Image (tube, rainbow, N blue to C red):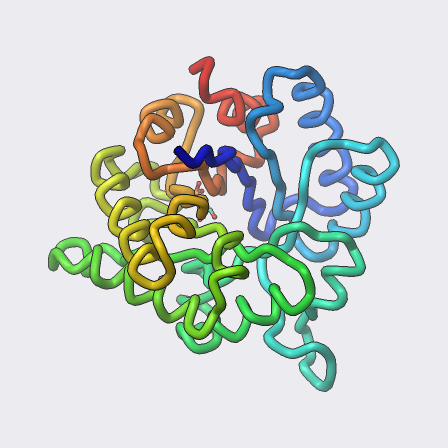
Amino acid sequence: MTTRTPLMAGNWKMNLNHLEAIAHVQKLAFALADKDYEAVEVAVLPPFTDLRSVQTLVDGDKLKIKYGAQDISQHDSGAYTGEISGPMLAKLKCTYVAIGHSERRQYHDETDEIVNAKVKAAYKHGLTPILCVGEELEVREAGSHVAHTLAQVEGGLKDLPAEQAETVVIAYEPVWAIGTGKVCGAEDAQEVCAAVRGKLAELYSQDVADRIRIQYGGSVKAGNVAEIMAQADIDGALVGGASLDADEFVKIVRFRDQ
Ligand SMILES: O=C[C@H](O)COP(=O)(O)O
């Protein structure tokens, strides 16, 4: 049986400046400085402007917390004002990069083609993509949420070889549950995550699908994380709002105690 290490990632979105980031990561590191959380991988995704400070702290104090970016350019360099490239993120020793978050899809018109190009850019530079997928409310209400999400998975991973795909992280985030307090029912989330794993098996193999971690995201809190993590195909959480509160995020990381 494949054992997947749960990944709890805090997506700070456009919150916390670099000084606040240092204080926040120090709090997390202090609270998690025992062995209890070793079976869980912990990551933070701060704004670009915080990454250097977070890197210095993590490197200097040899923290186990991983970090990454919230987006990546599909280009390596050039006249792309405002963009941040894979080589830049690699130089900052980022482990992860979120790609295709619904806020990028919604406010920056990111299509599956762009998302796919960004996933390839991440792998080109040794970064692990957290590929975000999930349906809007009207899609859920129309009953097409599974098909919609699977199409995003297939589009995001297009032409990606199995040896890369097996390390990807998929974050299933129903858009209607993001920042709304409306958490998707654990069994409803499991339904989609199981279908995602089935799609991965179809695209690659059951073995590859069994290695890929699938996170749930959308109003995850200390109070609901245990039920979500009890689902067979959910291997972690992508946490927005609740990751800005260090105490709450630590409780989420320690989901087995909740
Ligand atoms: O990336 C994180 C998700 O968008 C979830 O955000 P939320 O936990 O604030 O609902």
Residue 43, picture quadrant: top right
Q: Which residue lies furthest to the bottom in this view?
A: 79
Furthest-left residue in this view: 142
Position in image of residue 11 (x %, y %): 55, 45
Q: Where is residue 234 in the image (x, y as percent from the top left)?
A: 37, 37
Relative image position of residue 119 (x, y in whole percent)? 53, 66
108 relative position to 218: left or right: right
Residue lying farthest to the right in this orientation: 60
Q: Nearer the viewer, residue 115 or 175?
A: 115
Count of numbered badges drawn on the protein = 0
Residue visible at 32% across and 50% down?
Answer: 197
In front: 101, or 36?
36
* Residue at image coords 74%, 68%: 87
Residue drawn at 38 percent across, 50 percent down: 209
Image quadrant containing the C terminus: top left
Q: Is residue 82 left or right of residue 252?
A: right
Q: Against 142, is 3 above or below? A: above
**In the rendered image, the vertical position of residue 70 relative to residue 122, given as above or below:** above
Q: In which quarter of the image is ligand 1?
A: top left
Q: Quadrant of residue 83?
A: bottom right
Residue at coordinates 43% horizontally, 36% vertically from top-left? 2
> Where the N terminus falls, by quadrant?
top left
Quadrant in the rendering for residue 202: bottom left
Q: Position of residue 150 (x, y in %)?
A: 28, 61
